[in-house]
Image (cartoon, rainbow, N blue to C red):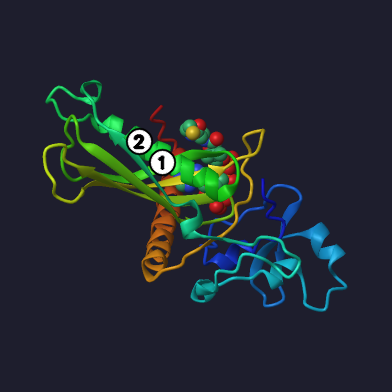
């Protein structure tokens, strides 16, 4: 497995700052020279304090507008990011009679399983180890899929945080009885968290969007991330307010 010892700071990937919390040992929140909050390995920082080029975190700092550089190595040869194309995959599967619902078309859950499988493979490849599904949202079924159709599930990392990755998935179907091009039949966005042997979140290398489409997807994923966090915060605040008012709905 590849080592990602010198990851760029969490904030440098354009991540929303609002949910920053103390990271697992040995990483801690520190304030960078520019005043922005960043994550770095304090031990590494101490060890590199003689380095005239600054801290590992500072050297590795990446910004979205410079991601075309596809930086994958620090001067020390440590990986700091992975281009989108490195982990992108397509999973193909022919639908059979066992995949149908009562209407005789393919069951949505079968498609969702393929989506989760493909996204999980991408998350594992990008993060270089195990990753678990944290959430799946905006799953859209655009057209029915039928027995015999060849389904292609295309997945790529859209965005990365500290330990989480948003994986975007497109589902296409080639009709078994038509020679027309594959038709998009669904899409979804999943968040995966990379985990260690104990199931605890671990850091992931930042994704480096390559094309304008990748960059747009990165920016859109960031919007979704902001909304997910805001929604979760708003719901927690509502529950706390209700609890404080003694409104018990258990
Ligand atoms: C996902 C899981 C590892 C998160 O653990 P946790 O202790 O809550 O850790 P954190 O709060 O630090 O979250 C880790 C990351 O996941 C993100 N995350 C956690 N829950 C999330 C959710 N519901 N939606 C979106 N992102 C989520 C966090 O924002 C964080 O991202 P970041 O590190 O990039 O900032 C944990 O909840 C878990 O193991 N869930 C079960 C997973 C599972 O069994 N999936 C199905 C089978 S694969």
With 19 as the anchor, is 22 left or right in this view? right
Is residue 33 visible from the viewing direction of this image?
A: yes
Is residue 236 visible from the viewing direction of this image?
A: no
Q: Quadrant of residue 93?
A: top left
Q: Quadrant of residue 82?
A: bottom right
Residue 30 in percent (x, y) is at 72, 64
Q: Determine contact: label 2, label 1, CB under 8 Å.
A: yes
Disc 1 element: helix
Q: Eyeballing the image, is 98 above or below 32?
A: above
- Which residue sits at x=73%, y=54%? 27
- Which residue sits at x=54%, y=56%? 161
Disc 2 element: helix
Q: Eyeballing the image, is 226 above or below 145?
A: below
Gap in angstroms between the C-alphas marked 2 and 1: 6 Å
Residue 90 in percent (x, y) is at 37, 46
Mark 1, residue position: 118
The numbered mark at residue 38 is none
Image quarter hosting the N terminus: top right
- Which residue sits at x=85%, y=64%? 46
The numbered mark at residue 114 is 2
With 119 as the anchor, is 106 left or right in this view? left
Residue 134 in percent (x, y) is at 47, 40
């Amino acid at each position: 497995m590849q080592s990602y010892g010198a990851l760029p700071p969490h904030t440098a990937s354009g991540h929303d700052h609002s949910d920053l919390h103390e990271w697992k040992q040995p990483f801690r929140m520190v304030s960078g020279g520019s005043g922005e909050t960043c994550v770095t390995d304090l031990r590494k920082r101490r060890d590199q304090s003689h380095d005239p080029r600054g801290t590992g975190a500072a050297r590795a700092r990446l910004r979205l507008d410079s991601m075309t550089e596809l930086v994958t190595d620090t001067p020390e040869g440590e990986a700091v990011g992975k281009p989108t194309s490195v982990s992108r995959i397509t999973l193909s599967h022919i639908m059979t009679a066992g995949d149908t619902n009562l209407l005789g078309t393919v069951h949505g859950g079968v498609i969702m399983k393929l989506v989760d499988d493909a996204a999980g493979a991408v998350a594992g490849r990008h993060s270089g180890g195990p990753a678990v599904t944290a959430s799946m949202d905006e799953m859209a079924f655009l057209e029915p899929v039928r027995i015999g159709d060849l389904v292609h599930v295309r997945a790529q990392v859209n965005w990365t945080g500290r330990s989480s990755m948003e994986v975007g998935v497109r589902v296409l179907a080639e009709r078994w009885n038509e020679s027309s091009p594959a038709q998009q039949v669904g899409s979804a966005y999943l968040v995966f968290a990379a985990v260690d042997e104990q199931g605890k979140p671990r850091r992931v290398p930042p994704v480096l969007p390559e094309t304008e489409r990748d960059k747009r997807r990165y920016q859109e994923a960031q919007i979704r991330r902001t909304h997910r966090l805001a929604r979760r915060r708003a719901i927690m605040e509502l529950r706390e307010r209700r609890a404080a008012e003694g409104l018990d709905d258990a």
